[in-house]
Image (cartoon, rainbow, N blue to C red):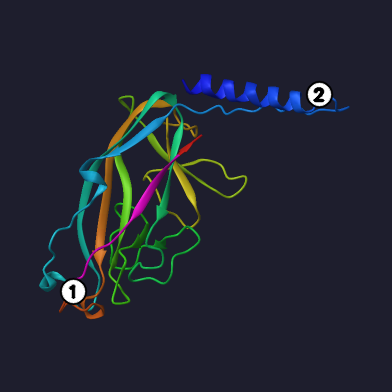
Amino acid sequence: MMNNITKTACALAVLATTSANVMAENIDVKVIGTITPSACKPVLTGGGTIDYGVIPPASLKKGSLTQLDRKSLDFSITCYAPAKVALKAINGRLNTVAGKGNDGAGSASYIPAGIKRELAHYVVGLGLDGGQRVGGYAIAMTDVTADGKSVAYGFKSLNSGAKWQTYPKSYFYYNVPIISSWFKPSTKEPVAFTNLAGKLNVQAYINKASELDLSNPVKLDGLTTLELVYL
């Protein structure tokens, strides 16, 4: 239906142009349209919410950061036909990561000392509470398959001329803006798929208890938007 509507609109535009300019010595004929890639739909279980529930203030370290447990959601991308896609992470809480300064060019900060780097090396913030930075979190995917087959992880800088590179971990944030995708093992070429599935993992940490007003509830308010990019 969309194709029919598009073709009709183009035909009408040409007719209107030629009719209006029939007496002119020169006329321009524009041929326009759009070729769209196979539509893909990303889905996260749990409404895309990682909930750490109620955290007792007594469990927080007074003079150092407190790392929380890793939590996971099921993540999938379904395409109507084989397609090559990537994900671009958009940090919705810029310059709020605890234990570091402001975010770098990649909208994230290198993970602070005292926090394990098992999931990723870059973190983003959990928002502010009374002007104080609440904490931060790492985000990455694991156990990913494309059409039932294991795939490798890769990313590419958005800088001009950048090339795809593989990495043992899936990165959404880095020291420069990047997009992330998945490759056939031992290649550096994103793979086309109809169904991709895996785990989206988050590991958060909380700022020093001495930096927070724990006499009132403190909300964890992290937000990352994962944007599909067709390749």
Where residue 177 appears, x then y in whole percent? 50, 53
Above or below — where is 12 with respect to 153?
Answer: above
Viewer-closest of 166 and 158 = 158
What is the quadrant of residue 41 in the picture? top left
Q: Which residue is mark 2?
A: 22
Where residue 85 appears, x then y in whole percent? 45, 34
The residue range painted magenta reads 217-228
Task: Tell me which residue sits at (69%, 26%) in the image.
Answer: 16
Q: Residues within 10 Å of mark 2 (few under 14, many from 20)?
A: few
Task: Tell me which residue sits at (23%, 77%) in the image.
Answer: 212
Task: Tell me which residue sits at (26%, 46%) in the image.
Answer: 48
**Mark 1: secondary structure:** loop
What is the quadrant of residue 54 in the picture? bottom left
Is any part of residue 2 visible from this angle?
A: yes
Above or below — where is 151 with respect to 90?
Answer: above
**Mark 2: secondary structure:** loop
Which mark is on residue 61? Answer: 1
Above or below — where is 82 with respect to 115?
Answer: above
Relative placement, left or right, of 39 versus 133 is right
Viewer-closest of 170 and 229 = 229
Where residue 76 appears, x then y in whole percent? 30, 35
Is any part of residue 29 visible from this angle?
A: no
Above or below — where is 153 with respect to 223?
Answer: above
Residue type beneath disc 1: Lys
Q: Is residue 139 magenta?
A: no
Relative placement, left or right, of 4 versus 49 is right
Which mark is on residue 140? Answer: none
Mark 1 / mark 2, whichever is N-terminal: 2
Q: CA distance from mark 1 to mark 2?
A: 80 Å
